Amino acid sequence: MAIAKVKSADEITYFTKSGTVLDGQNSSTTRVFGGGGQNNSPVHISSSTTQHLHLFVRQDDGKEFDTTFDNIGVAVRAGHRVSVIFAMPKNDDGGYATGLVVHDTGRTSICRATANSLVKRFNEWLGLAMGIFLPFVIAAIFGDWSDWGYFWLFGVLVVSGYLFSRKLHSNAVRDAIVDGVQVEMNKAIEQEKARAKAA
C-alpha cells in the first residue's frame, strides 16, 4: 500500500494506541551495494542494515494490534506497557507508526524515516531535467547564443535555488510532523501516569 504524501504538517492527524506487549520480534534486513571490478578497477562494496521491531500489543479493551518499526532503537519485551503514536494523512484511511513510548523503562523514540516518508517531495528526475534544459530555454529566450553560457549559468543558479528551497520546505514539514508526534508522546506519558495512579 502506497503511503499518502502531504505538503503541509496541517494535513496530518495523530492517534495513539496503548496497551501491553504480548510479543516483540526483532529481525534485520541487509542490502549490499557494489561496483567496479572491470578493467582492473577496484571493487567497492558497502552495505546497510535495517533493524525491524514487530510488536503485538493488547489494548486495555482487549483488542489487539500489531505494528512494525524500523531502526527505532528501543528495546521492548513481552509485558511492557507501550503507547504507539500513529501519524495519518487526512486523505488516507490508515496510520503509520511513528512514535513509541515504553512506559516501564521510560524510553521513547520517534521514527524520523517514517515521518520523512509522509512528506511529498519534489520529483528528483523532474529537478534533473529542469537543471539540464531550463537554462537552455532561458538562454534561448533572453540571450544571444554567442553568450548563452552566461544565461545557462543564470538558469542553473535559478533552478538550484528553487530545488534547495523545496528541500528546505520538505524538511520543515518533516520536522513539524516529528514535533506533532512528540506532543502526542507527552500526552500518552501523562495519561499513563494518571492510569497507574488511579489503579
Image: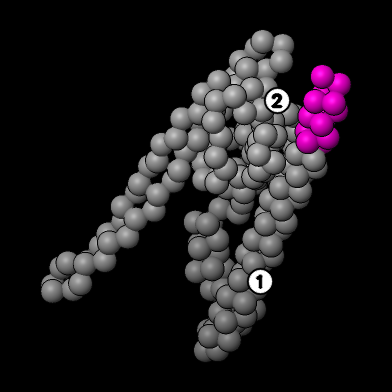
- The numbered mark at residue 161 is 1
Q: Amino acid at mark 2?
A: Ser
Mark 1: amino acid:
Gly
Along the horizontal axis of the image, is 97 left or right of 196? left
Q: Residues within 10 Å of mark 1 (few under 14, many from 20)?
A: few
Give 28 or 103, whichever is nearer the viewer. 103
- Which residue: 62% across, 28% down? 80
The residue range painted magenta reads 187-199
Whether 133 is among the magenta residues is no
Q: Position of residue 15 (x, y in %)?
A: 75, 29
Count numbered badges in the picture: 2
Residue where numbered disc 2 is placed = 18
Question: Residue 29: in sight, yes or no?
Answer: yes
Q: Quadrant of residue 85?
A: top right
Q: Residue at x 51, y 23 (%)?
A: 23
Describe the element under mark 2 as helix, strand or loop.
strand
Q: Nearer the viewer, residue 94 or 76?
A: 76
x and y percentages locating residue 148 in the rendered image: 54, 84
Q: Residue furthest bottom?
A: 146
Instruction: Give the CA separation, mark 2 to mark 1.
Output: 44 Å
Tag 1 secondary structure: helix
- Whether residue 192 is in magenta: the answer is yes
Q: How is the image coloured?
A: one colour
